[in-house]
Amino acid sequence: MKLEEVVYANLLRIAQADGNIAASEATMLERYRVALGVTRRSADELADVRDLPCPSELTESRTERMHIIEMMIRIAHADGQLTLRERRWLERLAVSLEIGPIELANILVRAVGEKSLRRSIFVSRGIGAIVVCGLLLVVWIVQSGLHHSFDERLNGATETTTRRETELLGRIEKLEADLLEADSARAERDAEKVRETRRAMKRSEASLAARLQQLEAQRARTPASAQKSKAAQTNANAVIADLRRELAQVRSINAVFQDIEREFARSVLLIYSRYELVKGRHRVRRWTKGTGFFISRTGYIVTAKHVVQNWLFSAEALRMKQQGYRLDTSRYLLAAWPAGKIVKQEDNHLDLDTAFHTLNNSLRVFKLAPDKMVLTDRRLSDGSRYTGRFHALDHHDIAILEAEVHGEVTPAMLAPNGHRMSKLDPVMVLGFPGSISVRESRRAETAPSLGEIRKIEDSIFVTAPIVPGNSGGPLIDSRGYVIGIASASYGASTVGGCIPIRHAISLLPVSVLRQLRRRR
């Protein structure tokens, strides 16, 4: 099925979402049918098709996906209102097209604004016609000899208005002068107190920042072959973490996390996986993006399993496998770009020369957490429901990758044993949400989000947004420790679920565990 036919079929579905197709929706549907090149016969046949492929399966172009969601919104709002069922349909389609909730909200406002603007133009034209008629009437009155009395009344009204404005301005100026005179002394005293407090905070911040920089530089200069004793290394990490906590008390939490984000930029990677499902001659390509981070100097990477093996988690993929499709393992691609590397070439194709990937064996899956399949019901992108055995989104959603690195890399600093976490502790989720930063610069640039710990159970629940592309990325506290792995979001991304880092440590080889013990 062609992309144009799939798009038209989805336009038809959302027009029917509220039970009937309004005249304005039918008119716009006909325009889109002609523009997309869909024949009337094909349009009639598409009305009866139930199992439609998702538009994201037929195009990798970000621009085309944005156009598709804009077309859907225009159809839904053609009758002047957006029902709850239509909005839910749009939200589900946006997720399948990898369009975040903020982008969807912006597109919705823009589409509604365009319709309001057209109404405003229509109303403005009507008002303009009335004004012109009124002016013609005034001209006729003037030509009839009544303009003298009209001018006298107008001048009298103008003089009265001017006099009142002058009186009001005088009263306002007097009140302002009285207030300034009464408060000037107190304002000056308060301002001096604020300036003194800021100077003290700056002095304290500069002293702590210099000490922290000195310790981190000293640790970076220590060669790997000259590792300190476990007790000394643990003490050094604890001193740096304590300094960060003290620094957080005199600086804004944003500034603290800005420093941590710059340090972690050398450890985070953009993860991309692509696979194909085959049935006879028909092939469907699907892809997933996420985040990973180095956990050792020798190239071991932690990420989410649903980024690496998405076919175990995707409702569309599981339904297709039930319909007879199979996974073509020979066409599987897994790639990882360190932050700052070029991801796409100028022609919008992936630049694998800058990545670790499976095609040249510079990247491989080292170990996966055991599969845990659960029977559940999920909604598909076309709005229908599918019941099947999906992989659980719990602490089994972990994958360990191994990259062929040249020289040592900078691993993330993991939380030590017994590290305490509490509700309302500030945290940062670091990764590539929706790969938003790749669009303009074509580079893998991290996009952090801040929040707080909401509760701690077998998972860590946070208020920091976790959206597609964040999965597998590190959850970092204000002391610079990785305490968890971003995994899922709940309630339209208002709550993020993260896996405690201890579950990933249990999957690592013995050699890496020894490195971690020395560093922790």
Image (tube, rainbow, N blue to C red):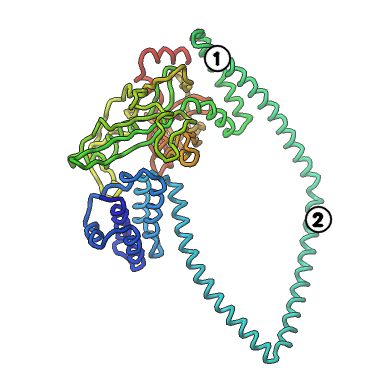
Q: Is residue 296 left or right of residue 155?
A: left
Residue on which the image places disc 2: 177
Neighbor class of circle 1 (other Cα within 10 Å; few <14, some 14-19, many 20+) is some
Residue located 63% across and 24% down the image: 209
SS type, badge 2? helix
Task: State the residue in front, 233 or 62.
Answer: 62
Q: Is residue 330 left or right of residue 398?
A: left
Percent x, y for residue 422?
48, 29
Q: Is residue 321 visible?
A: no
Residue located 78% across and 48% down the image: 183
Neighbor class of circle 2 (other Cα within 10 Å; few <14, some 14-19, many 20+) is few
Residue located 47% across and 20% down the image: 409
Cα–Cα gap, marks 1 and 2: 60 Å
Q: Is residue 207 left or right of residue 311?
A: right
User: Farthest bottom residue?
Assistant: 144
Label 1 is placed on what type of residue?
Answer: Ala
Q: Is residue 308 visible?
A: yes
Q: Is residue 245 above or below residue 26?
A: above
Res 72 quadrant in image: bottom left
Residue on which the image places disc 1: 236
Res 200 quadrant in image: top right
Task: State the residue in front, 90 or 416.
Answer: 90
